[in-house]
Image (cartoon, rainbow, N blue to C red):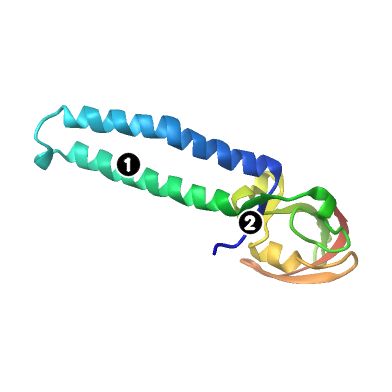
């Protein structure tokens, strides 16, 4: 059995929307491409037809993967989030112990991670290093540039 994945309502709805688009517009476009390639003659030597069929197979695989993902997806209720520790969906304000730089990140599922919006995956080195920490605690995180020590200043939603 697949592990339950938690999402924000926004992230869950985005997944459902993408799946719906693939099943409707995506499948219709694939059928059009296959029909167009079929009209070009002998299928045994038709590279365009083979490419369209391969693309259709890849899209169906993606649809299947997304359906499986959605079957285990749950929307995280913000009222259930414990703000005494860093966890999924919390926003944490940290201070780099070496240079004093302040940063604020929200820990999200991997599919919702977006560094431009300061949303980091709970599976990233930073996410893993911050999980479970309390305000005032220090975390040592193995980043690509080396070991980074940060202090947890604040945990919010």
What is the CA distance from the residue labelled 2 to the residue labelled 1?
27 Å
Q: Secondary structure at mark 1?
A: helix
Residue at position x 20%, y 37% in the image: 49
- Figure check: 125 above or below 72: below
Decide which of 76, 119 is in the foreground and name it: 76
Residue at position x 83%, y 70% in the image: 138
Q: Secondary structure at mark 2?
A: strand
From the top left corner, tell me how far across and down residue 134 is, in percent: 86, 66
- Residue at mark 2: 5
From the top left corner, tell me how far across and down residue 70 is, in percent: 56, 49
Residue at position x 61%, y 66% in the image: 144
How many discs appear? 2
Contact between marks 2 and 1 (CB within 8 A): the answer is no
Kindly identify which numbered label has been placed on residue 43.
none
Residue at position x 59%, y 54% in the image: 72
- Residue at mark 1: 56
Decide which of 108, 1 is in the foreground and name it: 1
> In the figure, is residue 137 to the left or right of 140?
right
Quarter of the image where one finds residue 29: top left
């Amino acid at each position: 059995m697949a592990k339950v994945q938690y999402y924000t309502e926004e992230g869950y709805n985005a997944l459902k929307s993408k799946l719906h688009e693939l099943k409707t517009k995506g499948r219709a476009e694939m059928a059009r491409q296959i029909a167009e390639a079929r009209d070009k003659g002998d299928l045994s030597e038709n590279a365009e037809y083979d490419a369209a069929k391969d693309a259709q197979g890849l899209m169906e695989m993606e649809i299947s993967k997304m359906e499986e993902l959605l079957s285990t997806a749950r929307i995280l209720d913000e009222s259930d989030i414990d703000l005494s520790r860093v966890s999924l969906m919390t926003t944490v304000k940290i201070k780099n112990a070496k240079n004093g730089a302040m940063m604020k990140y929200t820990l999200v599922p991997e599919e919702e991670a977006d560094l431009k919006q300061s949303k980091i995956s709970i599976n990233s080195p930073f996410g893993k290093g911050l999980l479970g920490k309390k305000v005032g605690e220090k975390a040592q995180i193995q980043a690509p540039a080396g070991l980074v020590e940060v202090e947890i200043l604040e945990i919010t939603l």
